[in-house]
Image (cartoon, helix red, strand yellow):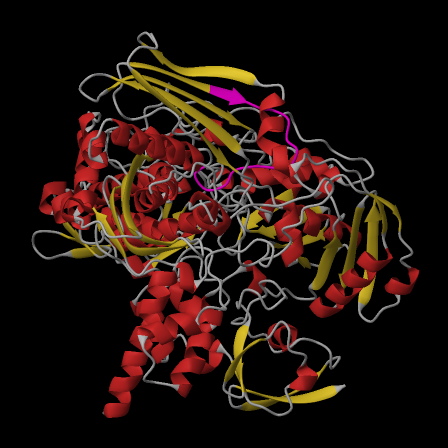
């Protein structure tokens, strides 16, 4: 069955079983690397992407339930040559060790950034709770997210 | 020179350069045998005094190659595990070669291209590979100077090097590429080569940005999980439901007809599926799991009496320290500490790709040891090892021997069933949680006597442990190989010898005690599969030893930091202890209800990095919740190549060890592992990480690199236990310091 998905601003027609979780479509059909398989159970957040502005576990969300909502992945935040504010913040804070969880972290943080740019450090920490990191990069991740908020604030003030 | 050609296949030519160069025409003595972790590391250099891994791979072109365009390739037998090793190795090479780090291509562990440096383990990469690359690069630079002097018709002291170019006094320049044209660097390293003066360092000692991070934050191909080979198919393995379960029957015909399914593979109790698309493989795997009938055995010990059962197992006793006389006089104190089975718990389940073409296998793997893995695969597949190439590709952080090698074996077995087709296998979360080799349980019993002035007069320490390495080298170390009809069995486990040790790693205190005895009780019998988890026995030994130091300080009515310094004769250790205490403002700490401070120190393996950790914690007695308000660490890693990389590793080590120490324990009933996912085996989330972590790096320019990646695992555990004891007035000696244990200690 063919399903249309809006991903990072462009439309894609995907031929897959409607029960297929979004994660597998992103990775295997559309060759997007950002969202990662971590648990397939919604426990770790390494598959986090934005759907309709909300952070979701793409490993659990069947493509049939997307219903036209726009999907955003880490590839939609910028490129290697032109990294976006969230990506720049993670590079500047060197907020990765193995980095496997990081794209999911960035997408969860991005969802908060787009919803509440005035979020406090405590808000950020609470918001990031669903995502796991095993290398213990949490402190840097929090600093990077803060920095991304600050970037965005200073850019909107310009 | 093509970086693609293996060093052993290169044509060798005499290099006319400095007269001091020794030229060899023999093949580099590659270590083709499986290197046990203990053999790879801590070996006393005997015949060859060459530094680092130059001992086993002495040829300069095994490490550094420069092509005729001046492009520099650096090769390492070590692998990026998320610790940032690639960046640090490039910094080291750039410094000694006097080139821009951005122009260097780095090739990591690959059996067809790089040196055999055994495992990337034991915090040895900078010591082994960093040291080899540093000296090889320095000697290549000296060769380039000699070549330039000849070409520019001058002497080497009249030449300066900048970013890949040599400049003579009159301003004539010549590039490295032009200098090496027609030359070959297949020459053996010498001892006593000149290194650049640390005072002139441009790249080493500077916080260099990690080269791998940009791709990781923009969705680039950064992991083995992201590789997509032409015609690649996907495999999944249906693992037995319990450690000794045998597959009785499987009605697989209906599943073979499912969409996308190419093949169902059964060999003994090894059951797997190959499908066109990944989700098709997952769907078929689930159907096979439902259809499979297993015979299970209640083979596991009673979790309630695990430690008693453990101590009753047959054991080998090794006295690893015996000095002075133990008279049993003075004020005697004793305590016993315990550590359960714990997980590596990589966030990304293990993954590998294998392809069989023209009787040869190529295996893309995130194994920590491509050469030992190749040996194990060769035995399992019954092919000569020359017909297997293992290429390291980064995976999710591993923290030791996880399922990386096992999934490579899975992929190789499936590749054999569909010749020509690359097969990608990624484990499911439950596979990783229930089948990865765990960090083994340990029991530590400490006893000491204090003299009248409060000094330790006698020290006795015993540790009971399984092995801390069942790494491959043999087919029986690969999970799938133990499930085949013609099953392989793992070689008998052995203790890893001192000075690095396994279960007894850091069991010998660095403190000076006049009379001391330390015994390692090695237990060969393994009720569950175990192997190397970050820092091996050091985590539990330092937890016990440094908890006990606090118990002794309390008995001696002395400040814990002061008590440590009293017994410490190693100046660098004392400096690290002082730095952490000062930055924490230990002396000014104001005790408040529900709050406590804790301190701990260790030098990893007694020969790696020195690290001290201090915590300020808040303990909520009713909920059992422990919050770390502030963490301060100090570390001495010898010469710091990338100080930010060290900080990143230390911060990460603290947070990870906090997770182990507060929450982690593998659970099981008499038959099955019951901690099957993050629900059953919770780890620290954002709400549980410290409010702040401060890391102070003490740089020692000119001193040898000291392995850092595992240095804070033990000190973190003890500092936390000490802080909790300070806050509660009650000591908890069983890991983890879970909420239920805190509540029980509070009498709730």
Image quadrant in which you'd find residue B58: top left
User: Which portion, as a residue range, is magenta?
Assistant: B520-535
For the residue pair A33 and B415, the one nearer the viewer reads as A33
- Residue at 33% in and 25% down: B509
**Of A14 and B675, the residue lying toward us:** B675
Task: Please give left or right for residue B223 compared with residue A157 in the image.
Answer: right
Main SS, magenta residues: loop
User: Residue placed farthest to the left in the image?
Assistant: B170
> Which residue occupies 60% across, 47% down?
B403
Percent position of residue B492, x then y: 64, 25
Q: Could you say which is closer to the camera, residue B623 or residue B718?
A: B623
- In this view of the protein, can residue B697 be seen by the observer? yes
Residue placed most toward the observer, B89 or B334: B334
Q: In this view, does B637 lie to the left or right of B284?
A: left
Q: Does the magenta stretch include residue B524?
A: yes
User: Is residue B278 found inside the magenta-colored segment of the image?
Assistant: no
Q: Is B147 left, or right, of B116 in this rendering?
A: left
Q: Can residue B3 be seen in this view?
A: no
- Image point (33%, 33%), residue name: B546
Q: Compared to B427, does B26 lie above or below?
A: above
């Amino acid at each position: 069955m063919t399903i249309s998905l809006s991903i990072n601003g462009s439309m894609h027609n995907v031929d897959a079983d409607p029960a297929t979780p979004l994660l597998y479509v992103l990775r295997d059909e559309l060759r997007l690397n950002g969202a990662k398989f971590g648990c397939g159970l919604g426990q770790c957040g390494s598959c986090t992407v934005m759907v309709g502005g909300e952070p979701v576990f793409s490993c659990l969300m069947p493509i049939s339930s997307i219903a036209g909502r726009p999907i955003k992945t880490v590839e939609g935040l910028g490129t290697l040559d032109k990294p976006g504010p969230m990506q720049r913040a993670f590079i500047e804070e060197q907020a990765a060790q193995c980095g496997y969880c990081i794209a999911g972290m960035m997408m969860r943080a991005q969802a908060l950034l787009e919803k509440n740019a005035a979020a406090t450090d405590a808000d950020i920490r609470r918001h990031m709770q669903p995502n796991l990191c095993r290398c213990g990069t949490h402190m840097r991740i929090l600093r990077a997210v803060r920095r991304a908020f600050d970037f965005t604030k200073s850019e909107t003030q310009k | 020179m093509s970086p693609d050609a293996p060093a052993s296949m290169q044509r060798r030519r005499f290099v006319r350069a400095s007269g001091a160069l020794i030229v060899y025409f023999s093949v580099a003595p590659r270590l083709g045998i499986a290197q046990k972790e203990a053999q790879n590391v801590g070996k006393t250099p005997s015949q060859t005094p060459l530094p680092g891994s130059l001992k086993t791979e002495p040829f300069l072109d095994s490490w550094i190659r420069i092509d005729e365009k001046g492009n520099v390739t650096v090769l390492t037998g070590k692998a990026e595990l998320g610790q940032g090793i690639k960046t640090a190795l490039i910094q080291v090479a750039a410094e000694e070669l006097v080139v821009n780090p951005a122009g260097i291509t780095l090739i990591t562990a690959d059996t067809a291209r790089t040196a055999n440096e055994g495992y990337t383990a034991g915090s040895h990469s900078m010591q082994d590979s960093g040291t080899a690359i540093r000296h090889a690069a320095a000697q290549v630079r000296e060769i380039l100077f000699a070549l330039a002097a000849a070409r520019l018709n001058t002497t080497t002291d009249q030449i300066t090097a900048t970013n890949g170019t040599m400049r003579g006094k009159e301003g004539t320049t010549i590039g490295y590429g032009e200098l090496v044209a027609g030359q070959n660097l297949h020459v053996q390293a010498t001892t006593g080569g000149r290194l650049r003066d640390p005072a002139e360092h441009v790249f080493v000692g500077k916080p260099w940005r990690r080269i791998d991070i940009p791709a990781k934050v923009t969705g680039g191909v950064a992991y083995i999980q992201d590789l997509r080979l032409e015609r690649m198919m996907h495999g999944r393995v249906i693992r037995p439901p319990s450690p000794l379960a045998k597959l009785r029957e499987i009605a697989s015909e209906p599943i073979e007809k499912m969409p996308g399914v190419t093949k169902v593979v059964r060999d003994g109790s090894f059951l797997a599926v190959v499908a066109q698309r990944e989700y098709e493989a997952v769907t078929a795997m689930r159907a096979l799991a439902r259809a499979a009938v297993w015979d299970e055995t209640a083979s596991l010990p009673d979790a309630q009496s695990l430690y008693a059962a453990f101590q009753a197992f047959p054991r080998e006793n090794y006295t690893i320290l015996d000095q002075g006389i133990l008279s049993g006089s003075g004020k005697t104190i004793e305590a016993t500490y315990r550590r359960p089975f714990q997980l590596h718990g990589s966030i990304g389940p293990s993954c590998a790709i294998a392809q069989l073409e023209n009787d040869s296998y190529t295996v893309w793997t995130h194994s920590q040891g491509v050469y030992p893995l190749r040996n194990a695969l060769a035995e399992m597949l019954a092919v000569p090892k020359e017909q297997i190439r293992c290429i390291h590709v980064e995976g999710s952080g591993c923290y030791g021997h996880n399922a990386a090698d096992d999934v490579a074996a899975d992929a190789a077995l499936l590749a054999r069933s569909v010749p020509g087709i690359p097969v990608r296998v990624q484990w499911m979360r439950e596979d990783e949680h229930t089948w990865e080799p765990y960090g083994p349980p340990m029991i530590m019993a400490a006893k000491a006597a204090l003299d009248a002035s409060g000094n330790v007069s006698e020290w006795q320490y015993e540790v009971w442990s399984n092995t801390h390495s069942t790494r491959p080298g043999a087919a029986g170390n690969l999970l799938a190989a133990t499930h085949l009809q013609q099953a392989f069995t793992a070689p008998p486990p052995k203790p890893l010898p001192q000075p690095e040790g396994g279960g007894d790693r850091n069991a010998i205190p660095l403190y000076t005690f006049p009379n001391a005895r330390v015994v390692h009780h090695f237990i060969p019998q393994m009720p569950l599969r175990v192997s190397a988890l970050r820092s091996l026995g050091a985590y539990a030994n330092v937890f016990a030893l440094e908890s006990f130091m606090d118990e002794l300080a309390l008995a001696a009515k002395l400040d814990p930091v002061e008590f440590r310094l009293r017994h410490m004769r190693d100046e660098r250790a004392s400096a690290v202890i002082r730095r952490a205490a000062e930055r924490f403002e230990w002396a000014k700490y104001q005790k408040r209800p529900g709050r406590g401070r804790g301190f701990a120190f260790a030098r990893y393996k007694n020969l790696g990095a020195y690290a001290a950790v201090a915590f300020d914690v808040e303990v909520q007695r009713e909920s059992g919740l422990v919050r770390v308000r502030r963490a301060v660490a100090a570390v001495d890693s010898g010469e710091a190549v990338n100080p930010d990389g060290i900080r990143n590793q230390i911060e990460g080590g603290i947070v990870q060890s906090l997770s182990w120490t507060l929450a982690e324990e593998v659970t099981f009933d008499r038959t099955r592992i019951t901690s099957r996912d993050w629900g059953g085996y919770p780890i620290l989330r954002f709400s549980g990480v410290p409010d702040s972590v401060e890391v102070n790096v003490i740089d020692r320019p000119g001193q040898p690199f000291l392995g850092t990646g595992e240095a804070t695992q033990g000190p973190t555990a003890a500092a936390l236990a000490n802080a909790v004891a300070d806050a509660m007035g009650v000591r908890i000696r069983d890991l983890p310091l879970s909420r239920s244990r805190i509540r029980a200690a509070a009498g709730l």
